[in-house]
Amino acid sequence: MTPVHPPPNSNRYLSLPNTYQLSIPAVPASDLPRERANALFTSAEHVGYLSSACADIAEAIRTGPARGVRGDVISGLHEEYRQKCADDDAAARQRLAEDRRNERDAKRSVQTAAQQQQQQTRIASEQCNELLRILAARRRQTATMNDGERADLQRSETNYAERCKH
């Protein structure tokens, strides 16, 4: 993969196929302010998805300044990382994004299921309240009911008890 030479005064990053942007500058790390060059590796969550060799290089870049490693050595590590790990870095970032998307989807599914359960509980409660209202009205009329209507009332009460009295 060859870097695309950007127009002057543009953001200088490697262009990758499928519009993925690699956060490793296409310029030598020595041309960047030291804190910016190392910031690329300080909180890179995707490092856990890198191959062990690339993760080791990224860790060496991240911890180099704190260990007193010279700037030219860190620049060399940046260059080695660009050469050896560009594809691995892009794939690691893609896997991280996919894992995050899957986590969001799983949370959304759990929330949707909980909302559906709440709605079903609310509907069942409303149905039970309506059945109870109907039963109360029918109970007031038991004196005028024939045997068939009383049997029907008994079935309704049994149905209410089974459905609504857990």
Image: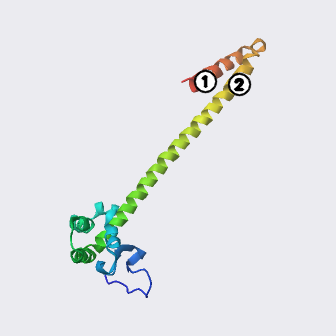
Q: Looking at this view, is 3 or 18 the one in front?
A: 3
Q: Quadrant of residue 142?
A: top right
Amino acid type of the residue that numbered disc 1 sits on in the rendered structure:
Asn
Residue that numbered label 1 is attached to? 159
Residue 16's spot in the image, x, y percent? 37, 78
The mark found on residue 133 in the picture is 2
Task: Tell me the number on the disc at residue 66.
Answer: none
Q: Helix or strand or loop: what does disc 2 sit on?
A: helix
Numbered-mark total: 2
As rendered, which of 15 and 155 lies closer to the eye? 15
Q: Earlier in the sequence, mark 1 or mark 2?
A: 2
Please state, as top left, top right, bottom left or bottom right, where the C terminus lies in the image. top right
Instruction: Residue 139: give x, y in percent of width and height.
Output: 72, 17
Percent x, y of residue 77: 23, 74
Q: Nearer the viewer, residue 27 or 119?
A: 27
Q: Work out which quarter of the rendered image holds the N terminus and state it.
A: bottom left
Which residue is rendered at x = 74% and y = 21% of the image? 137
Q: How is the image coloured?
A: rainbow
Q: In this picture, is 148 found above or below 69?
A: above
Q: Amino acid at mark 2?
A: Arg
Residue at the farthest front position = 68
Q: Residue at x 60, y 33 (%)?
A: 124
Task: Kindly report the distance in space between the C-alpha atoms of the residues bearing marks 1 and 2.
Answer: 14 Å
**Front one among 140 and 65:** 65
Determine crowd level at label 2: few under 14, some 14-19, many 20+ residues with C-alpha closer than 10 A. Answer: few
Few, some or many residues within 10 Å of mark 1 (<14, 14–19, 20+): few
Quadrant in the rendering for residue 61 = bottom left
- State which mark lies toward you, 1 or 2: 2
Vertical relation: 10 (above or below) 113: below
The residue at 32%/64% (across/down) is 42
